[in-house]
Image (cartoon, rainbow, N blue to C red):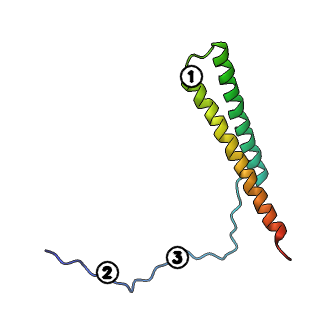
Amino acid sequence: MDSIPIISSNIPLTLPKTSGAEVSQAASNFGDILSSTINQVNQADVKGEMAIKNFNTGEVQNLHEVMIAADEADIAIRMLVQMRNKALEAYNEIMRLQI
């Protein structure tokens, strides 16, 4: 059986040098992201309501498609509510800070 070669531990690791002045910026600001998320949740809700309406009128025969659309809308709304709760918690935490 061959022996395992020993890895030399004295090889230095090199990291790229930066001046520290580079600051990355987000492609869009928080307001744009929040607005986009709210619009997506609204679209999912409208799609779910339309699927239910179309099922009730007999235009759609597949119940599973209606249930999927309704569940997607429900999950999107729950996610948005949780985002709001986390933002409110963060705001309250900031307000409790003593300066």
Q: Is residue 29 visible?
A: no
Q: Is residue 52 left or right of residue 12?
A: right
Residue 16 to residue 56: above or below: below
Q: Quadrant of residue 60?
A: top right
Please give the name of the residue rendered at 81% of the width and 63% of the height, measured from the top-left corner: 92
Q: Secondary structure at mark 1?
A: helix
Would you name the residue on which mark 3 appears?
15
The crowding category of the residue bearing disc 3, from other C-alpha atoms within 10 Å (few below 14, some 14 to 19, many at least 20), is few
Q: CA distance from mark 2 to mark 3?
A: 20 Å
Does label 2 or label 1 sit earlier along the sequence? 2
Please give the name of the residue rendered at 58% of the width and 31% of the height, measured from the top-left corner: 68
Q: Nearer the viewer, mark 2 or mark 1?
A: 1
Q: Amino acid at mark 3?
A: Leu
Please, which residue is most extreme toward the left here? 1
Q: Secondary structure at mark 3?
A: loop
Give coordinates of residue 17: x percent, y percent. 58, 77
Q: CA distance from mark 2 to mark 1?
A: 62 Å
User: Quadrant where the C terminus lies?
Assistant: bottom right
User: Quadrant where the N terminus lies?
Assistant: bottom left
Does label 1 or label 3 sit earlier along the sequence? 3
Would you name the residue on which mark 2 appears?
7
Q: Secondary structure at mark 2?
A: loop
Instruction: State the mark number for residue 63.
Output: 1
Q: Amino acid at mark 2?
A: Ile
Q: Nearer the viewer, mark 1 or mark 3?
A: 1
Q: Amino acid at mark 1?
A: Leu
Residue 34 to residue 22: above or below: above
Q: CA distance from mark 1 to mark 3?
A: 57 Å
Contact? badges 1 and 3 (CB < 8 Å):
no
